[in-house]
Amino acid sequence: MSPFRFLCITGFFAILSSTISKSPVLPLFAAHLGADPAEIGMVAGISAFSGVIFSIPAGLLADRYGRRRILIFSSVLFATIPFLYLIIDNIWQLALVRFLHGFATPAFLPVGMAYVSDLYRAERGEKMGWFSTATLLGRFCAPVAGGAILSAVTLFGDMRFGAVYVFCGAMGLIALFMTLRMPAVEEHHTERRTWKGIRLGFLAVISSRVIIVTSMVEAAILFAYGTFETFVPLFAQKAGISTTAIGIMISAQVLTLALTKPVMGRFSDRHGRKAQIFYGGAMCALCMCAFGLSSSFEALFAASILLGLCLSIVTSATSALIADASRCEDRGAAMGVLGSIMDIGHSTGPLAAGIVAGYFGFSYAFMAAGGLVAAIALCFLFFMGKRALSFGRADIDEDGVCSK
C-alpha cells in the first residue's frame, strides 16, 4: 500500500482507540470511582487541555525530526496509555491518565495532516479530506463499540470498564503496527534543522496573516460545534424528543461530515479555498441561529445535517489553505498552531455557551455561537480581501507552497 493508505488506516484505528476511551465509558467510569459532576467535567476536559499545549510542540518536533518519527511516538502512546486505566482506583489517577492520554491525538492529527500535505499538492484538499474521513469513521464507530462492550460484559461488574480499555489498547496496538509498517518516504524538510531555524520558522508561521486568521475561523466553527454537541441533546430532550431520535440526529451529522469532506476538499482544490471558507462560515452562523428557532425533530434534524455540511465545507478548506500558505519545512508548526487554536475554540464553546444558556436559555446560546462565527467570518473577509468573495484557483498558489 501507499504511505497515504497506511496513514488513513492508522488514523482510523488511532482515533477509534482514542475516542472509545471516553465515549461512552469515561463519565460512567468516573462516576463509578465516586466523582461528582464537577469532577466528571474536569476529567472530560483535561485531555483537551493536553491538546492545546502539545499541538504546537508536536508540530515543531515533526519539522525537526521528521513526520514519521512523531507519528510513531503518538502511536506508542495510543498503544500503551490505555492499559494504565486498568490500575486506576481513584478520580485523580484517572485525571492524570487522561492528561497523558491527551498527548496522543495532538501528536498524531496535526502531524498526519502535515504528512499528507507533503505528499500531495494539486489534490491536497481532497487527500486531507479522505484522511479526515478515516479518522471521523473511527470517531463514529467508537461509541457504538464501547457501548456494545459495556452491555455485553455487564454481568462482570467492575470488570466491564477494564474490558473497554483492553479493547482500546488493542486498537492502539494495531495503529502502532500500521505506523511501523508505513513505507518510508523522502522528507526533504528534515535535514536536521537547527533549533534556531525551527524558532525562526515558528515565528514566520505565527506572523502569517493567512495562517492565524484561517485558524481563527476553524476555532469559531468548532466553538459552534462544541455548543451543538453539548446543548442540543438537552434542548431537544426539553422539546420532548426521544433519546433515540437525538442519537439518530447526531449520527446523521457525523456521517454527513465524513462523507462530504473529500468532495469539499476536491472542490477547494479546483475552485479555491478562501471563498469556500467565508461562505461556509456564513452558512454555519445561520445554521446555529436556526437551532435556537427550532423545536421539532424535523427542524433540528435538518439543521444538524446542515451543520455537518458547513463543518465539512469550512474544515476541508482551512487545513489545506494553511498548508498552502506555509513552507514545507515549517508545515508541522503551521498544523500545530491550527490544532492548538482549534482546540481552544472547541473547549471554550461549551463553557461560554453554558454561561449564556444559564442566564438567557438554550436558544440564545445557539444564537450567540452563530454570532461569533459570523463575526470571525467577516474578519476573515476583511483580512483576505475580495478573493474571499469569488471562487477561483488564484488563492491556491500562495507564497511558500512546496515546489516539489
Image (cartoon, rainbow, N blue to C red):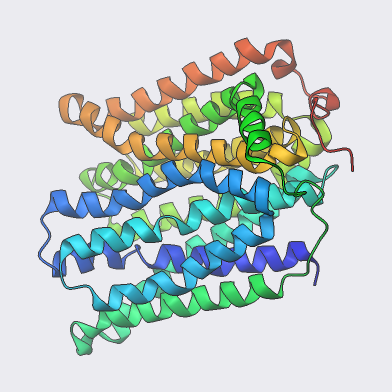
**Residue 238 locus on image (x, y percent):** 21, 44
Image quadrant holding the C terminus, namely top right
Asked if residue 267 can be seen in this view, the reply is yes
Task: Say which residue appears at 32% left-offset and 85% top-offset.
Answer: 152
Q: Is residue 203 left or right of residue 371?
A: right
Q: Residue furthest right?
A: 404
Residue 128 % position (x, y): 70, 49
Above or below residue 365? Residue 21 is: below
Residue 210 falls left or right of residue 338: right
Residue situated in front as seen by the camera: 350 or 66: 66
Q: Indicate the quadrant where residue 323 lies.
A: top right
Which residue appears at 59% of the width and 54% of the height? 258
> Residue 309: where, in percent of width, then height?
58, 41
Q: Is residue 393 left or right of residue 179?
A: right
- Residue located 28% across and 53% down the image: 44
Viewer-nearest residue: 389 or 30: 30
The reply, left or right, for residue 120 in relation to residue 172 is right
* Above or below for 109 versus 204: below
Q: Position of residue 15 (x, y in %)?
A: 51, 62
Q: Residue at x 75, y 61 (%)?
A: 4
**Residue 113, visible in the rendered structure:** no
User: Relative to 391, is 294 above or below?
Assistant: below
Q: Quadrant of residue 112?
A: bottom right
Please determine whether, in this image, residue 23 is positioned above or below residue 272: below
| Image quadrant where one finds the N terminus | bottom right
Q: How many marks?
A: 0
